[in-house]
Image: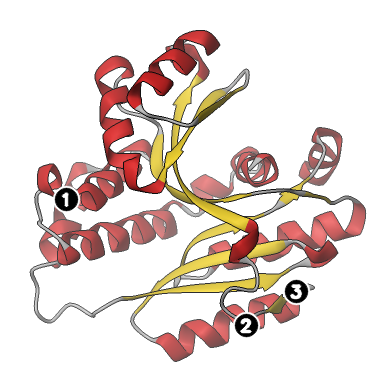
Amino acid sequence: MAGHSKWANIQHRKGRQDAKRSKMFSKLSKEITVAAKMGAPDPEFNPRLRLAIMAAKAQSMPKDNIDRAIKKSTNADEAAFEEIRYEGFGPAGVGLIVEALTDNRNRAASEVRTIFSKNGGNLGETGSVSFMFDLVGYIEYAAEVASEDGMLEAAIEAGAEDVQSSEDTHEVYCAFDQLNEVSSALEKTFGEASSAKPIWKPQNTIDVEGDKAATLLKLMNALDDCDDVQNVYANFEISDEEMERLAD
């Protein structure tokens, strides 16, 4: 996930998060509404809703917005959203998994296909990329909440499978179906995580540089800007030096 994490960081440095705050809240609200609609509207009895609320809080989404999103789930007139996964390839043969929540399957497919074709990629068949990834649980904490050894010990005790620590974060990985249990256990020790969600984790990464790196980031940003797209995952690696150059 290093490449994908760096892409998120470069967005932040360029101020994209502030510019896209409204769009981000819209996507978070959509996930909360769908999670509440598919299960109980109480996060205590709905792990998916609990994680969706946690993700919203991590982005400083106001409580009123969260409450409104939950209430929408009981509105019979509210549009029904469908979960769709798209798979495709970007520059340098990078594999991408795109998760969408949409009330119009045809519109979403057309927009995603167009974004791929305009940015050096092509949309593939379902299964053409996902076999190169593992669906896992992902929990992130800021580095200052614990030492590397302290986080590793607590995470393993909570049932996690791996921890990758850096100067900025602790990234905890666990089995997909253990995400709620592991995140709840860690929360008792370290407080709320800055992120806790299922992700597609690449088994291997592809090194990308130069023009292909620039085009790949353009593709990922365009996908992220699409209203129907919730999450984008990719198996690339770009060096720190290259990312700094692209950030200028």
Q: Secondary structure at mark 1?
A: loop
Is 106 above or below relative to 149? below
In the orientation shown, which residue stands out farthest toward the right?
210
- Other residues around mark 1 within 10 Å, as few (<14) / some (14–19) / many (≥20): some
- Above or below, 241 against 114 in this view is above
Image coordinates of residue 41 in percent, x first then y, are: 10, 55
- Please state which amino acid type lies under the numbered disc 3: Gly
Q: Which residue is mark 3?
A: 121
Instruction: Report the number of discs.
Output: 3
Q: CA distance from mark 3 to mark 2?
A: 9 Å
- Indicate the quadrant where residue 157 lies: top left
The disc placed on residue 20 is: none
- Where residue 173 appears, as percent x and y from the top left, is 48, 35
Q: Earlier in the sequence, mark 3 or mark 2?
A: 2
Who comes first in sequence, dot 2 or dot 1? Answer: 1
- Look at label 1 and name its amino acid: Asn
User: What is the distance, in whole Å, between disc 2 and disc 1 at their CAs?
Assistant: 33 Å
